């Protein structure tokens, strides 16, 4: 049998650059570094608990595939100056989610420096600039002080407690496109401040998944 080849199918993952971060597509060398994050009990305290390299690889292939299917997904996060892998951030949606969610997980040794806020803000801006959504949400455990603080800092409104995917009784915050435009226009280029308050230190991870 002689094979005939058509044009290849490509899935483009945009790169987003902030003042301190690069949000980019995943690379094979990210897997052991992300697996080390996912194996840390404190990082995974409000998620599904620690898991290893095999499950991390399955998760990353899922996150990459979302870009092809939905046009959005979760980026790998690296430090802009050093290129060091720091975690993941972006927009996520699956069955059982009440909307497209912006979420982040930053390496524990980098908590408390505003990087989670910076990544979620970039995810909000990308979502409202590039996606056909009227609203973006985030959900987190009620005891996750870090992620609850990030949502409030960015001006997201507490919408109530709901089951989100496999997680029961999550705090759900939301922001509409109009609210985003109003807040960013009024605040100007300084929105939001880049250093997190110390209350955000208990966890730098929000859902989904890991």
Image: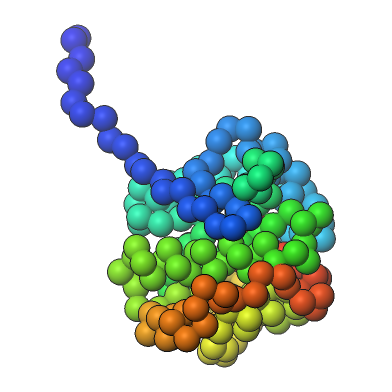
Between 19 and 49, the one nearer to me in the picture = 19
Which image quarter holds the C terminus?
A: bottom right
**Position of residue 192 in the picture relative to residue 101 (left or right):** right
On-image quarter of the N terminus: top left
The image quarter containing residue 106 is bottom right
Residue at the image point whose x is 17% and y is 18% from the top: 4
- Residue depicted at x 34% and y 63%: 130
Residue 182 drawn above or below residue 36: below
Front residue of 125/90: it is: 125
Can residue 1 be seen here? The reply is: yes
Colouring style: rainbow
Q: 1 or 111: nearer the eye?
A: 111
Residue that protrudes farthest toward the front in the picture: 189
Vertical order, 59 against 47 (above or below): above
> In the image, residue 59 lies at what x, y percent?
57, 48
Residue at image coords 21%, 29%? 7
Could you tell me residue 163's position as x and y percent?
56, 79
Quarter where residue 202 is shown: bottom right
- Residue 173 rendering spot, x and y as whole percentages: 55, 82
């Amino acid at each position: 049998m002689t094979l005939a080849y058509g044009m290849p199918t490509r899935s483009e993952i945009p790169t987003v650059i902030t003042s301190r971060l690069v949000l980019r597509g995943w690379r094979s060398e990210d897997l052991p570094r992300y697996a080390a994050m996912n194996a840390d009990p404190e990082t995974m305290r409000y998620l599904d608990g620690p898991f290893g390299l095999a499950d991390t690889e399955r998760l990353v292939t899922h996150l990459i595939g979302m870009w092809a299917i939905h046009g959005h997904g979760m980026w790998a996060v690296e430090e802009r100056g050093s290129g060091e892998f720091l975690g993941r951030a972006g927009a996520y949606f699956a069955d059982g989610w009440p909307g497209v969610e912006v979420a982040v997980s930053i390496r524990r040794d980098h908590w408390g420096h505003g990087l989670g806020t910076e990544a979620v803000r970039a995810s909000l801006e990308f979502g409202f600039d590039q996606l056909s959504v009227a609203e973006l949400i985030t959900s987190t455990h009620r005891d996750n002080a870090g992620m609850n603080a990030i949502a409030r800092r960015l001006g997201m409104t507490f919408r109530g407690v709901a089951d989100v995917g496999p997680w029961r009784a999550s705090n759900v915050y939301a922001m509409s496109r109009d609210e985003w435009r109003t807040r960013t226009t009024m605040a100007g280029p300084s929105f939001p401040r880049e250093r997190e308050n110390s209350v955000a230190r208990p966890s730098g991870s929000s859902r989904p998944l890991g």
